[in-house]
Image (tube, rainbow, N blue to C red):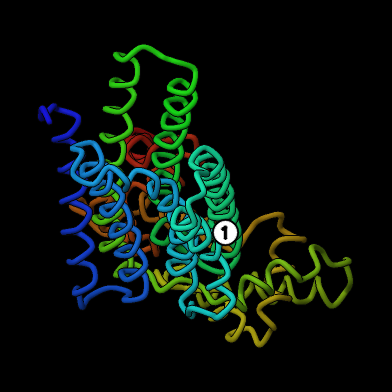
């Protein structure tokens, strides 16, 4: 077999996937169950690349009929990986094993002498797309929960995971284009170009997932499944009443006097406990009467505190960075974005305006 660039890329993806999988299996830091799932994902990816290399080299040509089965675990593992990051109490359940039945069936069928390669490929594309959609839904639900229960949303957002899903989706789409083009006799140059795109996309995806997957668990502990269920099942609004108005007044008074928004790790549960209110009820008070989620509500107070500090600094040397930390933010980029959204000016522009006035 003549060794071409595409074969070298396949070998690199294979070796990289196996090495990262081994590292994740033996890595002691971070969230172990997330590392295990991501390691399995990369192990199967490496195994598929190995079978592609061996089949194309004519060393084991029969392996190509098994290539379609690997895809049936990618979507499942990605979905489980997403859930393991989102939910701090995530554990494998027996029912999770049902997700792997299609993989087992598609793997066994070739041994029975039945050629279902095209059917298997179409099925795996549908399988992966389905689980990617489910992963997006889990992330969307997670974002709704944290916006209503955490004050520093930027620290625990999953934008990077959305980006990873997008990269994987684009790579999958290109692969589907290649499959259809090959079936209808596309020219060789087109097939090669698409193959390069797919494998380079996989390289990018593998590196991004391992880097962020290892970095991410140290940044946040996730939410509980009970929190997510409570957020989804609870009533969406409450009727105005004297009791609710009294609770709202109690909340506003507490915020002005005790200034809990200055605590960077303030949560809905912490504030509800201090006010002696059920967390769900407090969330409804904020959502219904103030038209804000918890994160926006707390950040409104933080921005007002920041504006006050910028108007009246402790001394001439006080920096914007010092101000943002003291009013409860823990990210400069988040502070700048929220400050401009609330005031129409960046913190620097606001500070300069105060100096000139």
Q: Is residue 307 visible?
A: no
Where is residue 275, by image quadrant?
Answer: bottom right
User: Where residue 31 appears, x then y in whole percent?
Assistant: 33, 74
**Between 219 and 277, which is closer to the camera in this rendering?**
219
User: Where residue 219 appears, x then y in whole percent?
Assistant: 32, 67
User: Where residue 137 appears, x then y in whole percent?
Assistant: 60, 54
**Between 263 and 189, which is closer to the camera in this rendering?**
189
Q: Is residue 53 above or below residue 145?
A: above
Residue at the (20%, 30%) spot, across then down: 6
Q: Viewed as shown, does residue 91 lie left or right of 285?
A: left
Q: Is residue 326 above or below residue 270?
A: above
Q: Is residue 268 above or below residue 49?
A: below
Q: Label 1: state its secondary structure.
A: helix
Crowding around mark 1 (Cα neighbors within 10 Å: few <14, some 14 to 19, many 20+) is some
Q: Which residue is labeled 1 in the image? A: 138
Residue at the (48%, 41%) spot, across then down: 117
Residue at the (23%, 72%) spot, across then down: 25
Q: Can you say which quadrant of the picture contains the N terminus?
A: top left
Q: Can you say which quadrant of the picture contains the C terminus?
A: top left
């Amino acid at each position: 077999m003549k060794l071409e660039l595409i074969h070298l890329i396949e070998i690199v993806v294979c070796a990289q996937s196996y090495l990262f999988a081994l590292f994740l299996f033996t890595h002691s830091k971070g969230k172990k169950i997330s590392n295990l799932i991501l390691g399995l994902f990369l192990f199967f990816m490496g195994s598929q690349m190995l079978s592609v290399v061996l089949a194309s080299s004519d060393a084991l040509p029969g392996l190509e009929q098994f290539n379609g089965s690997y895809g049936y675990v990618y979507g499942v593992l990605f979905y489980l990986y997403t859930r393991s990051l989102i939910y701090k109490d995530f554990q494998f359940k027996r029912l999770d094993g049902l997700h792997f039945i299609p993989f087992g069936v598609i793997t066994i069928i070739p041994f029975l002498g039945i050629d279902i390669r095209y059917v298997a490929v179409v099925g795996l594309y549908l399988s992966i797309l389905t689980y990617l959609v489910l992963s997006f839904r889990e992330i969307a639900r997670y974002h709704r929960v944290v916006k209503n229960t955490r004050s520093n949303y930027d620290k625990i957002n999953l934008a990077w995971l959305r980006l990873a899903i997008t990269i994987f989706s684009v790579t999958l789409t290109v692969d589907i284009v290649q499959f259809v083009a090959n079936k209808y006799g596309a020219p060789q140059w087109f097939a090669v170009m698409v193959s390069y795109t797919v494998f380079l996309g996989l390289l990018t995806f593998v590196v991004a997932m391992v880097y962020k997957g290892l970095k991410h668990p140290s940044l946040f502990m996730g939410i509980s499944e009970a929190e997510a269920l409570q957020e989804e099942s609870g009533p969406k609004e409450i009727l105005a009443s004297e009791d609710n108005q009294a609770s709202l007044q109690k909340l506003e008074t507490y915020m002005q006097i005790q200034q809990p928004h200055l605590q960077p790790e303030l949560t809905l549960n912490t504030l509800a406990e201090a006010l002696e209110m059920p967390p769900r009820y407090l969330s409804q008070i904020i959502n219904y009467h103030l038209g804000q989620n918890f994160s926006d509500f707390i950040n409104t107070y933080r921005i007002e505190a920041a504006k006050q500090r910028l108007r009246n600094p402790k001394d001439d040397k006080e920096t914007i960075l010092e101000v943002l930390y003291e009013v409860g933010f823990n990210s400069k980029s988040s502070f700048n974005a929220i400050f401009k959204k609330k005031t129409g000016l960046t913190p620097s522009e606001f500070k300069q305006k105060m100096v000139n006035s």
